[in-house]
Image (cartoon, rainbow, N blue to C red):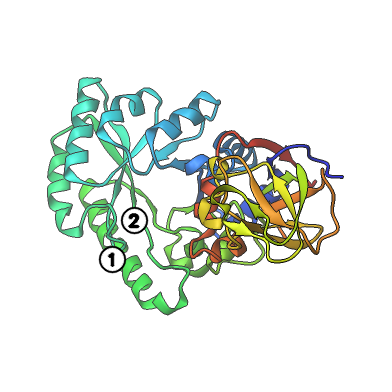
Amino acid sequence: MSKIQETVLEINLAHLTHNFNYLKNKVSSNVKMLAVVKASGYGSDASIIAKHLEKIGADYFAVAYVSEGVILRESGVKLPILVLHPQPVNFKKLIEYNLEPSLYSLRVLNQFIETASILNQKEYPVHIKFNTGLNRIGFSKNELGIILDTLSQTQAIKPIALLSHLAASEDSNEKEFTIQQIDAFKKIADTMIKKVGYPLTLHQSNTSGILNYPEAHFDMVRTGIGLYGYGNDVKYDTKLKPVASLKSIISQIHELEPGDSLGYNRAFIATDYTKTATIPIGHADGISRQYGNRKGFVTIQNKRAYIIGNVCMDMIMVDITDIDCEEGDEAIIFDANSGAAKIAENTGTISYELLTAISTRVKRIVVDDN
C-alpha cells in the first residue's frame, strides 16, 4: 500500500538545497544569487521555496507579477523581490510592499515615475531591462539617451540594476548569438554606468547561462528552472535533482470485456480484456485533456500505465492490464525517476507547462531526504 492517501505534490527541500548549492558553486563568491520563484515556484509553492532559500543563502528573489510578490511578503519573506513584468495598474501596491520593478519601456518608466512621485518616494530602487535579442520585453539600446534624460529629471526613482535575458544559452548551436547578446549588454551597461556615475548591479544569466557562459555572470545571476531540478529537460546539467514529485493513488480497479467502453464520449472501447485503474487527478488539477488516449502515463509498480479514454475533470483512467497492483497502491505522475519531460514530450509540449498547471487543490507536502 502507498504511504500517501490522496493526490499530493511532494516538495523535497533537500533536493532544493542541493540544486541551490550546486549552482552557487558555479559562480564566484562575490556574485549574488537571484532565485526566480514565479508561477508558484514553477508549480510547487513559492512561499515554501522562498523561505527555505532565504535560510540557505539566496540574495534576491524574482517573480513575474506584483501579486506574486505580495504573497511572498505576506508570508514573511524579507529579501529584495524583483518584479519582472509589472503592470502600471499595480505600481501603488508594488511600492506598498517594497518590491522592485523591472522597467522595460518608456510608457512603464514614465508611469512608474508618476506613481512614485505621487507617493512621495525618493530614489525608489528600480531595475532597467534591455532587450538584447530575445525580443520579448525591454528597452532597445537606441533608447538609452531618452532613458537617461528621463532619469535626470526625477528624484523619485533610482536605477540600482540593469538586466537582460539570454534567449538560447542552453543551445550549443546558438553560441555565436548568445555571445552577441552578452557583448551587447556589456556595451549598454558600460555607457549607462558612465552616465549615471555610480555602479549598477548587472544581471543577464539564467540557469543555462550560469552553466555555459561564465563571462555573463556579472554581479548577479538568475536561476529558476534549475533550482527545481527540471533543467535536464532543456539540456541543463544532469546533477540537478527534481524538487517536486506528483503522486496519487489507485481509487478503484475495473475489468473490461471486449466491446466495453470507458469514460466520457466512449473515447476508449476495449478490443480485448482490459484492466483499468481510476486515479483521483484530472484536468482541474493540471492534467490536460491532451494527455488522454494513451498520450500520457503514470508509473505504477515501476511500470508505465497509459491514460486511456478522455481525461476527466477530477479523474484519469489508466491501463493496468499487465501490472500487478491493487486499490490503494501509489500512482506516480512524475518524480525523480519518471520525469515530467517524459510525459510532456508525448504530447508535443514541455515539462514546464505540465508543472505550472498543477492546481492549488493538489495538497503540497514538504519532505526532506536529509
Position of residue 61 measured from the top left corner of the image (x, y, whole percent): 48, 41
* SS state under label 1: helix
Picture layout, residue 300 above or below residue 168:
above
Residue 184, disc: 1
The structure residue drawn at horizontal position 59% and vertical position 65%, both measured from the top left corner, is 232
Number of labels in the image equals: 2
Tell me the mark number nearer the camera, choosing from 2 and 1.
Answer: 2
- Disc assigned to residue 309: none
Asked if 304 appears above or below 41 in the picture, the reply is: below
The reply to whether residue 41 is visible in this rendering is yes
Visible in this render: residue 334? no
Residue 271 in percent (x, y) is at 68, 66
Which one is nearer the viewer's eye here, 306 or 236? 306
Residue 88 in the image: state x and y as whole percent: 25, 33
Which is more toward the observer, 211 or 134?
A: 134
| Residues at discs 2 and 1 in contact (Cβ within 8 Å) | yes
Q: Is residue 28 left or right of residue 203?
A: right
Per the rendering, the mark at residue 164 is 2
Question: Going by the image, does 297 lie left or right of 2?
Answer: left
Q: Earlier in the sequence, mark 2 or mark 1?
A: 2
At x 34%, y 25%, the residue is 93
Image-quadrant location for residue 90: top left
Does residue 81 appear left or right of residue 85 in this picture? Answer: right
Name the one closer to the observer, 113 or 302.
Answer: 302
Type of amino acid at the residue the image marks with label 1:
Ala
User: In the rendered view of the protein, which quadrant contains the N terminus?
Assistant: top right
Q: Amino acid at mark 2?
A: Ser
The residue that appears at 60% across and 66% down in the rendered structure is 237
List the single residue furthest toward the front. 259
Mark 2 to mark 1 CA distance (whole Å): 10 Å
